[in-house]
Image (tube, grey):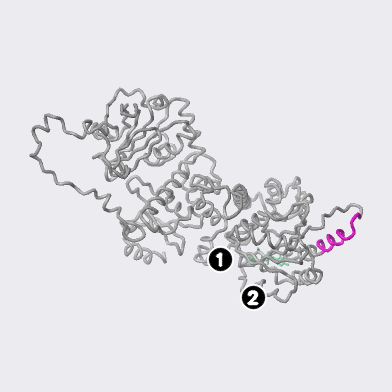
Amino acid sequence: MPDTFQGFPVSELVDDFRMACVSRAIDDREINMQKQSRVFFQISGAGHEVALSALARSLRPGSDWFFPYYRDRALVLALGVTPTAMLLQAVGSADDPASGGRQMPCHWGDADRHIVTQSSPTGSQCLPAVGCAEAGRYLARHRGLSGSAVAGDELTYVSLGEGAVSEGEFWESLNTACRLHLPVLYLVADNGYAISVRAADQAPAPVWELVRGFRGLAVTRMDGWDYAMCRERGAKAVARVRAGEGPGLLHVRVTRPYSHSAADSQTKYRAAGELAAEAAHDPIDTFERQLLAAGVLDAEQAAARALETVSYSGGALSQGMLLSVVSHHGFGVRYVQDLPRSARSVTDLRNRRIYLRQESLGMHTPRAVLLQTLGHFVLGHSAPSDFAEFLRQRVEANYFAAAVLVPERAAVSFLASAKENRNLSVEDLRDVFSVSYEMAAHRFTNLATHHLGLTCHFVKNDAGGVIYKAYENDGIIFPTDPTGAIEGQRMCRYWSGRQIFTVPDRFSPYYQYSDTPSGTYWCVASVDPASERAYAITLGVPFDDARWFRGRDTTRRTRSTCPDPGCCQRPPARLAERWDGKAWPSARAHSHVLSALPAGSFPGVDEADVYAFLDRHERD
Ligand SMILES: Cc1ncc(C[n+]2csc(CCOP(=O)(O)OP(=O)(O)O)c2C)c(N)n1
Ligand SMILES: [Mg+2]
């Protein structure tokens, strides 16, 4: 992992990302509680979080003064107000430290951090804020007044929405702030709406244009989905105000993914397409994609966040939670009968709809396909430019899907107790989390080494022994071509992935010990019955670790000396003598290799079919 990204310490970026997520999570929780009548009102800070957590880096709680408005949850959290304090206010508890339960929810207040409690009429915070800045200057100029302690470079922060700037109080306050060159930092959060009124219907021009005649006011524009921009430009603006050069105004474009408040339904006045377009640059998702691209976060962490957003607390992921994960990222799901044959799923990016089949596709359950598809967008993939990128994206998206369906914490606790009972098995993992055998085996390899202290290998092969996927960190030697590629190679006839095709019952787990030149391994293989073509999935571990697994007592044992050609590739001497020079097999092309050759951006996908399909369904 890099130490810095875009010039900022990675640890700070991760903390700020986390803070933004916590802010959104509290909103989600309060919205649920409002539906349960445990909270009487809720107004969210969703869409505003990233800009505020970036800006907070330049502000000083307990020194600067804050007049934040109701959407500033992330700022207030970053200044040190705890989620517990917020939730106490939400439920109107007498223990609410901000107001003893007397204020409306989301009306921040914290004396120690200089967060001045708000009044509910919008814009009414502006005049007291300017008064506070003027008082601060007075105190700085009259040091030693009893009860006052000032450093002299404090600023006063005040925020409001783009709708509220058309109120007189804002302009009156600006008048004084500019005339007196007061250290006031205005933040106008422009989410495009004042309840149901569009910004264009509310004011003749955006505020950054309207304030042009106010001399001494420094205007900074930024996009609230661009963390680095907000952090850099925010820091500069703060430094200028702090240095006494006059007031500043930050105009921040943000999003409003949720309705205005719990008393509003924005689907009544905002088109689905508009909401979908906004969801595409949701600030938290955008920030996450940047951190993933920089290697600061990985697919495992992205999956963990996706689960946190739906308050996942253990066990197999229910269908309801799965759909919440998807809708939390602004996507809808449609199951269809006529999906183009060449695609697992098709996504309409304009309307943010994922189309898929209801039935399993080989070993891919519809749940897995849905999450693989979502994974591409969560992980910030763009149309692959070459085949290598296509494959890398597919691996990452599959990892994301597995990490959501078999969540790390739940799976590790399940596997750890199975190990303690010497009863580890891939089938149990498959059944407990309702995934395919392949996904369970693959997920086992993701978690085994770090969490269970086991090295292992994974192989997927067909009945002819051709390897489709392979992974090892236990020293087993896979066959390779001269370039080192494993996929497409034929595995040893004595390995369990091939032996399983020789036994009468290929659908029960098949256990065996295999002696190989790199040691003895215990393996379990299984053929997935759901698949059109029979593929065997093998999970293996070094001999010593067999003791943790169900099936360790098998008496099957084979000996492989591959890659020595005398192992299984050379025909037995008797047959060779009989048939040498008297046979002419005509090779069958490996269709999987041919079909994988790139054609268009999405290899193997018939674009004409896909576009016709999307057109057919757009109005559904
Ligand atoms: C003086 C006053 N008028 C109307 C309201 C009702 N009201 C509360 S929030 C709001 C819209 C504010 O929109 P904007 O300033 O853009 O902030 P946003 O909620 O979009 O962040 C209105 C009209 C109010 N609280 N106070
Ligand atoms: Mg607004």
Q: Residues within 10 Å of mark 2 (few under 14, many from 20)?
A: few
Q: Residues within 10 Å of mark 1 (few under 14, many from 20)?
A: few
* Residue nearest the viewer, comparing 37 with 271: 271
Q: Which mark is residue 230?
A: none
Taking the magenta stretch, the answer to whether it contains residue 140 is yes
Is residue 29 in sight in this rendering?
Answer: no
Q: Residue at x 75, y 45 (%)?
A: 95
* Residue nearest the viewer, comparing 188 with 275: 188
SS of the residue at dot 1?
helix
* Residue nearest the viewer, comparing 328 with 337: 328
Residue picked out by circle 2: 205
Reply above or below: 197 against 330.
Answer: below
- The span picked out in magenta is 131-144
Q: How many numbered circles are shown?
A: 2
**Callout 1–callout 2 Cβ contact below 8 Å:** no
Q: Is residue 557 left or right of residue 84?
A: left
Where is residue 155? Give x, y as percent. Answer: 77, 59
Q: From mark 1 to mark 2, how far is it between C-alphas?
A: 25 Å
Q: Name the dominant secondary structure of the magenta segment.
A: helix
Q: Quadrant of residue 582?
A: top left
Where is residue 224? Give x, y as percent. Answer: 60, 61
Residue picked out by circle 1: 268
Q: Residue furthest front?
A: 482
- Which amino acid, by three-letter code, is at mark 2? Ala
| Quadrant (top left/top right/bottom left/bottom right) for the C terminus | bottom left
